[in-house]
Amino acid sequence: PRPEGGGWAPRVGWGAARLVLGSALAVMRGYRFVRRAARDGIPVAIVTASPTRGEGEADVRLHGRLGETLTALRAALPS
């Protein structure tokens, strides 16, 4: 069997949080990425218009169209 996460696993450990944009996390590889972050105490935020299987692990969940939501988030950030 392949090691969990394949070749990308070491690279995802570099950030302080995980942000999922526009994915239902239907593929186990993406969902595993969210599960590992939640297990390790790394905050997870998900932005999608429809339900996603990672909602139980998410610290922040924004329901909305991706373009509109990201535009509103950017406008809310300090310059």
Image: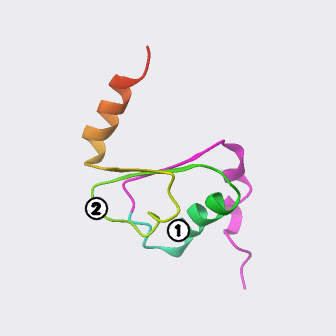
Which one is earlier in the sequence, the residue at label 2 or at label 1? 1
Q: Residue under circle 2?
A: 50
Up/down of 77 relative to 11, above or below: above
The foreground one among 56 and 54 is 56
Residue depicted at x 36% and y 24%:
76
Q: Position of residue 27 (x, y in %)?
A: 47, 73
Up/down of 49 relative to 28, above or below: above
Say if mark 2 contacts mark 1, CB within 8 Å. no
Please tell me how crowded label 1 is: few (under 14), some (14-19), or many (20+) other residues with Cα within 10 Å: some
Region of the chain picked out in magenta, as a range: 1-23
Secondary structure category for the residue under label 2: loop
Q: Residue lying farthest bottom? A: 1
The foreground one among 48 and 55 is 55
Q: Amino acid at mark 2?
A: Ser
Left or right for 66, reference 11: left
Q: Position of residue 77 (x, y in %)?
A: 42, 23
Q: Residue under circle 1?
A: 31
Residue 9 lies in the magenta stretch: yes
